[in-house]
Amino acid sequence: MTPYNPTEYNPQAMALNGLIKEHNRSIYFMLSKKGKAMYFPKYGILKQGAAAKGKDINATVGMATDEDGSPLCLRTMTDLVQMSSSEMFIYAPSHGVTELRKEWRDLIYKKNPSLKTEVSMPIVTSGLTHGLSRCAYTFFDPEDEVIIPHPFWGNYNLVFANEHFTKITTTPFFSGKKLDLEGIKYQLNDLGEKKGLLLNFPNNPSGYTPSEQEIDDLVQIIGGAADRGKKLIVLIDDAYFGLVFKDDIYKESIFTKLADFHENVMAVKIDGATKEDYAWGLRVGFLTFGIKGATKEIYEAIEDKIAGSLRGNISNVPMLSQSLVLKSLRSENYAAEKLEKFNILKKRFDKVEEILEKREDYKQFFTPLPFNSGYFMCIKLHDLSSEEVRQVLLKDYSTGIIAIEGDIIRIAFSATPLKLIEKLFENIFNACKDLTEKEKVAE
């Protein structure tokens, strides 16, 4: 691969690089080659279009308009949604709708009362996967490394390893019934000056969120590596933020503790309406940055780089999706409706706990991994293949689960009606029993 030549960068990219480098050389070091080359174009078509805004005749916009200047659109679409055409059909800014970005930033502070420092304005992405992809593009070259506790969401492989050729280094998620802090510590302090660390709490697939003490210990480990000169990009996948069902676990985002933590640490909060607001298909996510001592100008420089990569990737996130999320956030019913949905999931979580505590006989075939939050929980099979159990469940019990690797099954209680949770576990138990008896006969 031919390396980028800094002398060939666009002048706008060079200006952003200079600003970042002057403020914090560590953050500049964290940029990938593509990240250094990226900028948000403020001249050319965009500048000329902005200059024509409000004029009697504006023949600059790449959209079609009706005779009154409103978007030219089909009634077969507009009649389906009770919003103005300008809230649905116009191009949204590449950074995202300004009002939505402000609203989401305010919510981050509201949901994380310990967060007192200044953070960036969120950039709107097409879901969290897209946000992760833009981070991989902007901060990781093929030779760079991202550390991910394992097991993890399989899409991380596609985003980092397959799409951007980033090296994924795994470390065990659990040590006993707690987060494996020593494994993370070892990997952070291993060879290499630049490191990515991807944290996902509540976790997919395990459904585990660390305790306050575990989070404090993890932050101390990150600080120790940063003190030794490691340049750390901490990606915080907060897809399931807020869905915590126990009192003894950390209820804010670890972003709160890392946003103004160390000159060698850049915290990136990746979140969105997908799971938090039960809006999976709208594909509205956000990227928010926290950097120690960062000024508004530095944040805007990083925001412009992300927005530039987004413009060159999908142009912008759909206006309709952003408008729907914004209207929901501003509704007087928003909080009450979220609590109602939370309680539905909490009852299912409680039922899972109750069943696993009550049914001692299940332990002959499987034991649960630690879980306390999110959409999922996992069980670890004893001497059985998760794929074989999955096949029996499909064929004989009309039940679907996710088989992870050799002996782990992921169960989405988020998608299982309360009345069927007991039957779900009984079916898994019976499938395990069937396989065991079949193996005995074969012997």
Image: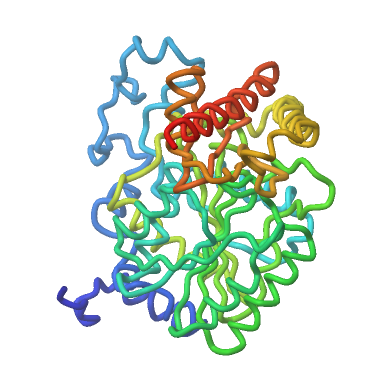
Q: Quadrant of the C terminus?
A: top left
Q: Is residue 96 left or right of residue 108?
A: left
- Give the x, y percent position of residue 439: 47, 35
Question: Is residue 164 shown above or below 414?
Answer: below
Which of the two residues, 1 or 15, is positioned nearer the viewer here? 1
Which of the two residues, 369 or 89, is positioned nearer the viewer here? 369
- Give the x, y percent position of residue 130: 40, 48
Q: Quadrant of the N terminus?
A: bottom left
- Give the x, y percent position of residue 342: 72, 31
- Give the x, y percent position of residue 38: 31, 66
Q: Residue at x 52, y 58 (%)?
A: 150
Q: Residue furthest bottom?
A: 228
Question: Is residue 91 shown above or below 407?
Answer: above
Q: Residue 307: which quarter of the image?
A: bottom left
Residue 335 seen in render: no
Query: How many labels sit on residues?
Result: 0
Q: Is residue 380 left or right of residue 192?
A: right
Residue 341 seen in render: yes
Which of the two residues, 426 or 309, is positioned nearer the viewer here? 426
